[in-house]
């Protein structure tokens, strides 16, 4: 992509309305634009990052055996009246009337809708277990939308729903999602800690929040310091095997949100306890037959007896993750994207468009990286060299090749790594090669 033909409306000034760093950086990097409170347009750079996150989430859901569907954003009130949540959900639900005066709503979540799909088609235990997910916009009329897309009113969520014949089978489904979340967040360059949590309006008696640690997080969290050394390798995971040992390993260390914290019976000695703040990027629930019973989602078991299915639901805040990743990875110059979600793999910065040598070498490097299959930005804008370098650091592209007239006299360009700040002068060929090598070495799963 040539910057002169693209749209990255960066801001020089720090927007006053933004209280946390991710919100400030997303506005400054031209990723989003507010439409009204808690509702945003996604500009090209923001959309690119969100789509990459979405794709990693999708791949990991598929790998864990979940199947993608797409349910509508607008739902009929009747389904929610059946479950009893239409009245309970309160003011957070955006209620709509259609032209025939029918009550509709903009879905804040989809337990009822998916249970309706299930009950229409699945009649026998033989079709179980089943896990269906979608990645779809939600609307919650939050009292205090804030921090940009972190607590929005309209936001993109991945929500999966599992169906199983009994509590034991449901636990297996829960464990698959638990483990897939560890792998998903790792691919996004994050350490997400599963914490015991309250279930809120979704309900149920077992639930974990996946929380990334950040000073600006909305909730206070308490966890064992050893969490910082915990990590799961994709190679350790076989979704057909018993995942309980992995789940046990990741739940034996203390980690709770403030609703669950009680200083009096905290098992961790003070010197090992970390009290910090966190951002909830995922939340998984097991709620048995809370929805299947009122909605009549039952199947015949092996003996022909009708059983209400046991369900769980599993959410990931896809749009919130864009901000969460920035909170976890930035410096005073701007965003430092993990390579897996960076809006571009690399940028070729031509400091002096119009200079024949700069143009020629920039174009060659750009074409070489494109031909190798990478998503490359060519900065061919006519801004000042300082403004260009600042803007590219702000938007956080992992690898940069800087081509300027002074270096060109000696046949030299500069290769820079955004994350470490390392930079080296080298020949254009060597710089192209360096980018290719770094990109080839990216963490894959
Ligand atoms: N149906 C269940 C699981 S599928 C559910 O709705 N769970 S949730 O309420 O916990 O939401 C799932 C995830 O969506 C949260 O972990 C959070 O990352 C994200 N999320 C929730 N509310 C917002 C919001 N207002 N803005 C941005 N992301 C949000």
Image (tube, helix red, strand yellow):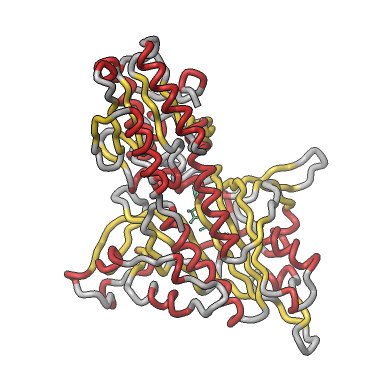
Residue 441's x, y, as percent? Answer: 38, 49
Residue 285's x, y, as percent? Answer: 53, 67
Give the vertical position of 292 relative to 181 (above or below): below
Give the vertical position of 245 relative to 325 (above or below): below
**Residue at x 34%, y 22% (from the top left corner):** 388
Instruction: Work out which residue is located at the far right of the displayed protein and give it.
Output: 100
Is residue 160 visible in the rendered structure shown here?
yes
**Residue at x 72%, y 53% (from the top left corner):** 77
Observer-nearest residue: 432 or 421? 432
- Say which quarter of the image contains residue 30: top left
Residue 162's x, y, as percent? Answer: 63, 68
Instruction: Work out which residue is located at the far bottom of the displayed protein and give it.
Output: 303
> Does residue 328 appear left or right of residue 235 in this picture?
left
Residue 117's x, y, as percent? Answer: 75, 61
Is residue 24 visible in the rendered structure shown here?
no
Observer-nearest residue: 63 or 68? 63
Observer-nearest residue: 242 or 409? 409
> Does residue 336 appear left or right of residue 198 in this picture?
left
**Residue at x 31%, y 35% (from the top left corner):** 334
**Residue at x 34%, y 40% (from the top left corner):** 336
- Say which quarter of the image contains residue 235: bottom left
In this rendering, the count of numbered labels is: 0
Give the vertical position of 144 relative to 247 (above or below): above
């Amino acid at each position: 992509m040539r910057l002169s033909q693209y749209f990255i409306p960066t801001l020089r000034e720090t927007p006053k309305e933004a209280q946390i760093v991710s919100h400030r950086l997303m506005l400054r990097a031209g990723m989003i634009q507010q439409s009204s409170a808690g509702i945003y347009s996604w500009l090209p750079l923001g959309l690119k990052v969100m789509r990459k996150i979405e794709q990693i989430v999708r791949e990991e859901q598929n790998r864990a055996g979940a199947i993608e569907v797409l349910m509508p954003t607008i739902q009929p009130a009747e389904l929610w009246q059946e479950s009893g949540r239409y009245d309970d959900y309160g003011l957070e639900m955006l209620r709509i009337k259609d032209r025939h005066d029918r009550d509709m709503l903009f879905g804040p979540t989809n337990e009822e809708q998916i249970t309706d799909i299930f009950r229409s088609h699945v009649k026998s235990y033989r079709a179980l277990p089943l896990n269906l997910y979608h990645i779809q916009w939600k609307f919650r009329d939050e009292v205090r939308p804030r921090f940009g897309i972190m607590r929005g009113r309209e936001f993109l969520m991945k929500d999966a729903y599992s169906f199983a014949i009994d509590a034991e089978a449901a636990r297996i489904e829960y464990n698959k999602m638990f483990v897939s979340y560890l792998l998903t967040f790792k691919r996004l360059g994050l350490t997400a800690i599963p914490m015991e949590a309250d279930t809120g309006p979704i309900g149920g008696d077992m639930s974990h929040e996946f929380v990334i640690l950040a000073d600006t997080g909305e909730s206070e969290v308490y966890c064992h310091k050893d969490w910082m050394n915990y990590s799961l390798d994709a190679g350790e995971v076989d979704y057909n095997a018993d995942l309980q040992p992995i789940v046990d390993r990741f739940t034996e260390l203390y980690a709770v949100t403030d609703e669950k914290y009680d200083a009096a019976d905290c098992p961790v000695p003070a010197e090992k306890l970390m009290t910090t703040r966190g951002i909830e990027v995922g939340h998984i629930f097991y709620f048995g037959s809370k929805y299947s019973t009122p909605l009549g989602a039952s199947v015949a078991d092996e003996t022909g007896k009708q059983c209400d299915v046991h369900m769980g639901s599993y959410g990931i805040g896809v749009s919130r993750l864009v901000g969460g990743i920035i909170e976890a990875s930035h410096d005073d110059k701007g965003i430092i994207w993990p390579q897996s979600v960076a809006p571009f793999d690399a940028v070729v910065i031509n400091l002096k468009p119009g200079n024949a040598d700069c143009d020629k070498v920039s174009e060659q490097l750009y074409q070489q990286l494109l031909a190798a299959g990478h998503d490359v930005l060519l900065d061919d804008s006519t801004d000042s060299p300082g403004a260009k370098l600042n803007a590219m650091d702000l938007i956080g592209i992992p690898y940069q090749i800087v081509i300027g007239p002074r270096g060109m006299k000696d046949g030299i360009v500069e290769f820079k790594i955004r994350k470490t700040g390392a930079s080296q002068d080298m020949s254009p060929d060597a710089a192209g090669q360096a980018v290719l090598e770094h990109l080839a070495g990216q963490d894959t799963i």
